[in-house]
Amino acid sequence: MLDLHRRSALVIAIGSSASLCPAWDISGVVIHLVAVEEMLLGSPPSAFADNLPFDRVVSASEEMSGLDPDALLARFHEVTAARRAELAALDADGFGTAVMTPVGPGTYGRFMDVRVFDHWVHEQDMRLPLGLPAHESGPAAERAIDEIEMSLPYIVGKRIGLPDAMSITFELTGPVERLMSLRVDGRAAPIEPTTDTDVVVTCDSTTFAMLACGRIDPDAPISDGSIQWVGDEQWGSTAARNLRFTM
C-alpha cells in the first residue's frame, strides 16, 4: 500500500505526468493495467482456452478515460485486491490450465508470469519519471529479468545480429544479479554462463530492462557509463544499442 506522500504524488501524476512508455502518460498506464486485470477478473482460467477477449480491454479503457485521478486510483486498488484474492485461491490445476497467452499457447501460470512482467515494467514507467523508489529487486524484478532472458536468443540473433561463431555475455550487477551467456552456431542459444566470451556487456538490471523494453535511448546510459562493454568493440557497441525486443 502506498504511504500518504507517495499516494498523493501518484494521484497528481495520474492527472498530468508523462510515463516512460511511449504510448501513454501515467494515467494511460494505470488504465491499461486495470483494464487487463478487469478482463481476467471473475472468469476461470478455462475461459481463456481459445482466445483473449481484448475487446473488453478496449471498452474498459475507454470507460476509465473519463475518471478523475482519485477515482482511477481507487479502481486500481479495488481490481488489484480482487485479482489477488482470485489468484491466492487458485490451485495447481488451475495454474496448469491450457490457455491462450499474449505470447502464444501456454498455461494460465505462464500467462500470469507475463502479467508479472507487464506490471513490473509499467511500474517502472511510472516510478522512474516521478523519482519514486523503483522496486528494482525482489521476486517481481527477478521474474521480469527472467522474461527478458528467455528472449535473449532473439535479441542476440535478430536485434543485435551477432555473427556465427561469436559469443556474448550480459553481466547484470544488481539489484538483480545475473550472468547470461550466448553463442551463435547457426542461431543464438544460451551457453554456460561465463565472462570468457567475445564481448561482455555490463550494466545494472533496471537499465538492462529499460533498454530491452525500449523505454530509454541507449545513448544516455552509454554516455554516463551505466552500460559498458569489454572485448570486441564493434559488437559491444552494437549490443548496447540494440537490446530492445518489446515496447
Image (tube, rainbow, N blue to C red):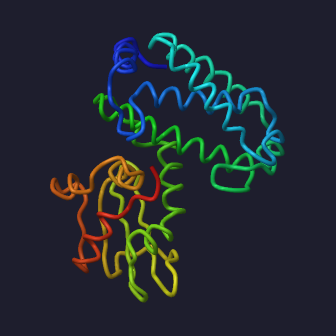
> Within the image, what quadrant is residue 165 found in?
bottom left
Coordinates of residue 1 in the picture (x, y in percent):
49, 19
**Residue at the spot x=50%, y=71% of the render?**
153
Left or right for 118, reference 9? right
Coordinates of residue 8 in the picture (x, y in percent):
36, 13
Residue placed most toward the observer, 75 or 181:
75
> Within the image, what quadrant is residue 17 found in?
top left
Residue placed most toward the observer, 206 or 23:
23
Left or right for 72, reference 90? left
Coordinates of residue 82 in the picture (x, y in percent):
68, 22
Coordinates of residue 122 in the picture (x, y in percent):
45, 37
**Residue at the spot x=38%, y=76% of the render?**
168
> Within the image, what quadrant is residue 137 found in?
top left
* Circle count: 0
**Residue at the spot x=60%, y=42% of the render?**
115
In the rendered image, the vertical position of residue 114 relative to residue 153, given as above or below:
above
**Residue at the spot x=29%, y=63% of the render?**
241
Left or right for 199, reference 192? left
Which residue is situated farthest in the left direction here?
A: 223
